[in-house]
Image: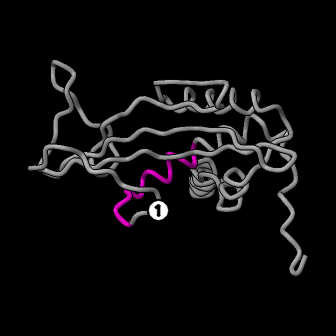
């Protein structure tokens, strides 16, 4: 083997390893339904929050909802640094306050996971953060990646119990 072929082989291996999930894998994880108990799906949701380094603010097994603590981010999605007293150090660009909620929802004879972002934007000169609703144009692009990571974590934990997609209603029925 020549040095060139070794380098090209290593490059190909690194390129394959660095690839994230495909669009099809993300869609499967986002729309997955699970043939498991609500409690088991809820525990997978809580475990996904912890696996993605979120601290739990609340977790209620009765309502099957868990909420992560709010965390400040720079506008570009990097974690905001804090001063010696633990307060976020705002830049002129402001900041994004982000929390995420995981819930379990009955879906026919199975359960699915709902991942809901709670996002506020603090602009320079403003005293209070303004809420950003899911789907709004102002929603930072990096939020979708954080939500996808949670869906993928739940799916990886429960893929053996993934149910067939819900049947689409027949027209005229």
> Residue furthest toward the bottom?
172
Q: Position of residue 139 (x, y in %)?
A: 38, 58
- Which residue is drawn at the image coordinates 75% and 50% (left, top)? 32
Q: Quadrant of residue 132?
A: bottom left
- Magenta highlight on residue 148: yes
Residues 51 and 128: in front is: 128
Q: Position of residue 150 (x, y in %)?
A: 59, 41
- Which residue is drawn at the image coordinates 19% and 48% (left, top)? 94
Span of residues in magenta: 137-149
Q: Quadrant of residue 61?
A: top right
Q: Position of residue 4 (x, y in %)?
A: 57, 58
Against 106, residue 53 (above or below) is: above
Q: Main secondary structure of the magenta part?
A: helix
Residues 92 and 134: in front is: 134
- Magenta highlight on residue 14: no
Residue 136 in the figure: left or right of residue 112: left
Against 138, residue 161 (above or below) is: above
Residues 20 and 69: in front is: 69
- Tag 1 secondary structure: loop
Query: Which residue is the site of mark 1?
Result: 135
Crowding at label 1, few (<14), some or many (≥20) Cα neighbours within 10 Å? Answer: few
> Residue furthest toward the left?
125
> Residue furthest toward the top?
85
Q: Position of residue 157 (x, y in %)?
A: 74, 34
Against 34, residue 166 (above or below) is: below
Against 170, residue 122 (above or below) is: above
- Which residue is drawn at the image coordinates 32% and 41% (left, top)? 97
Total marks in image: 1
> In the rendered image, which quarter contains the C terminus?
bottom right
- Which residue is drawn at the image coordinates 62% and 56% (left, top)? 12
């Amino acid at each position: 083997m020549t040095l060139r072929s070794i380098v090209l082989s290593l490059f190909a291996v690194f390129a394959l390893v660095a690839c994230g999930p495909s669009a099809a894998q993300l869609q499967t994880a986002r729309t997955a339904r699970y043939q498991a108990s609500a409690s088991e799906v809820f525990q997978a949701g809580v475990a996904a929050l912890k696996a993605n380094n979120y601290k739990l603010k609340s977790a209620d097994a009765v309502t099957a909802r868990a909420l992560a603590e709010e965390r400040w981010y720079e506008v570009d999605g990097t974690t905001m640094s804090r001063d010696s007293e633990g307060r976020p150090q705002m830049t002129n660009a402001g900041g994004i306050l982000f929390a995420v909620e995981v819930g379990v929802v009955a879906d026919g004879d199975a359960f699915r996971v709902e991942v809901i972002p709670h996002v506020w934007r603090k602009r320079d000169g403003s005293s209070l953060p303004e809420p950003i609703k899911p789907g709004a144009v102002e929603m930072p692009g990096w939020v979708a990646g954080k939500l996808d990571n949670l869906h993928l974590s739940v799916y990886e934990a429960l893929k053996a119990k993934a149910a067939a997609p819900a049947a689409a209603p027949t027209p005229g029925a």
